[in-house]
Image (cartoon, rainbow, N blue to C red):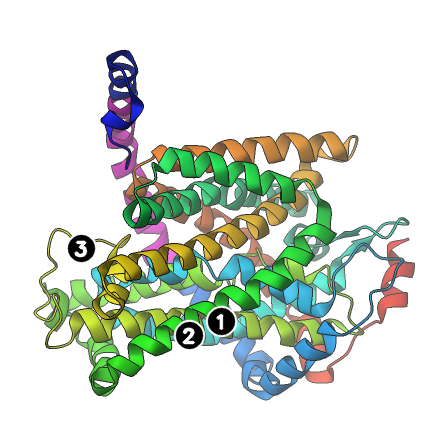
Amino acid sequence: MHTKLSEFGDESLMFGYAKEESAVQAFENIIYPIVCDFNSYLGNYILVFLLVGVGLWYSIKTHFVQVRCFGEGWRNIFRGKDSVQNPKYVSMTSFQALATAVSAQVGTGNVVGASGAILTGGPGAIFWMWIIAFLGMATVYSEAVLAIETRRIDKDGTIHGGPVYYITTAFKSGFGRFLAAFFAAAIISALGFMGCMVLSNSIGATIHNAFGVPSPAVGIALALICALIFLGGVHRLALVAEKLAPLMVGMFMVGSFVVLFKRVEYIPETFGMIFRYAFEPQAIIGGSFGTAIKAAVTQGVKRGLFSNEAGMGSTPHAHAQAQVETPHQQGAVAMIGVFIDTFVVLTLNALVIISTMYTADGPIASGFIPEYIGKTNLAQLAFGSVFGEQFGAVFVAVCLFCFAFTSILGWNFFGKVNALYLFGKNNPKKCVIIYSLISMLFIFMGTFIQDDLVWELQDMCNNFMVLPNIIALFALTNIVVRGALNKGARNEKEQTDKAQ
């Protein structure tokens, strides 16, 4: 909670607010250790192997498509940006689909999540984020290809696509319907609801630190702004995403390069720490080697997952909307989203943090973390060491607001597709309105919840999403491999005819 009691006026309001805070705190104290234990078991012993496994599987099966078709992905982006949409489809250009995916991918995971990973697992956690991202490029390729292959196009041109459709393609029995429903419920909870809490929590904390604005007030304003876009449909989301995504990434890159230019003498040492502490994390975070390496790897994997979302099954909803000639084209574009998220934005943030906070003249050079440093303010302190405390806090707050705001828009859309799948067959308009109102409530609630609990709840829901998605990815290997090696599949006309 970031709001002071004095900001609420008279004693009666103060007393009521204090009681509410006490009840919330008591609930958190009960729930938090349960959620942590569950995430620790699932994340450390199951999720790591599944994510690494599916990434390795598709890297090998596609002959490392993330390397072979990397340049093609960039070319497809710029070709898609200038393409003319077919008026028959309620869809996006390839560039708009990528922008929507990047808007969702580049978020608090790049700033707050990476900060938490570095604090908990040491600088070496970034190395494991890179590994996950490299493998994740092959994973997200497969997700995008399957999203295009299995999407449904209504007679009015509305496109429905995402993991629920390729899950039911992989398993046509009741088991497939169960897995699809499980995934849909998980993503609605993880992104549409809990994800909104994570994002608004991070926005509220950083804006409060930078400007002194009460976090709940930020939550109210954020919910109202998002509502204007939530209810505007695919076209409004696409227009906002294609404008904001390049702007926010460019702004963060410029600020990061300024800091790194000032700290250029520490860049070799910074990269050295990332590689050294990936394999010797006990030297910086303490403890035994086994405990330290486990922390470095799991933090890199979990926060890497939250950052680039490869394997989660979220970004296929955006890529399914793209107008492309073949699924392979959008699969190549999807890989660029992971590259931008992790190898550009997240890496720049990590280099800024490590070069200013962990090098010889930094406050964490010895590995001891002062009490005033946490994952919500680490990036602000890092940028502030060069920009000045106030401007550094403001810069990160503005960047984080843009990142998290666009993530909320993307995540809401992903959740909405699945809400319509579960509940919208008879009255889709009513379903969208109810879903959007609940999502707005969670945006506001996020500013009241302890940030550690919010992150753990988000991790739990992410884990639930991954399981059915990865099962389907393994089951549909042949479709993905055919697209990757032959670089083609059925064209748009064939897809439309089949759907109708």
**Left or right: where 195 falls relative to 39:** right
Q: Amino acid at mark 2?
A: Val
Residue farthest toward the top in the current orientation of the protein: 12
Q: Which mark identifies residue 167?
A: none
Residue 81 showing in the rendered view: yes
Give how far apart the Cα atoms at labels 2 and 3 are: 25 Å
**Given the image, on which type of amino acid does mark 3 rest?**
Ile
For the stretch drawn in magenta, the main secondary structure is helix
Report the residue at 26% width, 55% height from top. 375
Residue at horizontal 34%, vertical 56%?
A: 394
Where residue 125 appears, as percent x and y from the top left, is 28, 69
Q: For this view, does 114 lie left or right of residue 86?
A: left
Where does the image place residue 95, in percent across and percent down from the top left? 68, 69
Q: Relative to 261, is 251 on the left or the right? A: right
Amino acid under disc 1: Gly
- The answer to whether residue 272 shows anywhere in this view is no
**Vertical side of 152 occupied by 21: above or below:** above
Tell which of 164 and 352 is nearer to you: 352
Q: Which mark is residue 373?
A: 3
In the picture of the structure, the residue carrying the numbered disc 2 is 254
Instruction: Determine the image quadrant of residue 284.
Output: bottom left
Q: Which residues are magenta?
A: 21-47
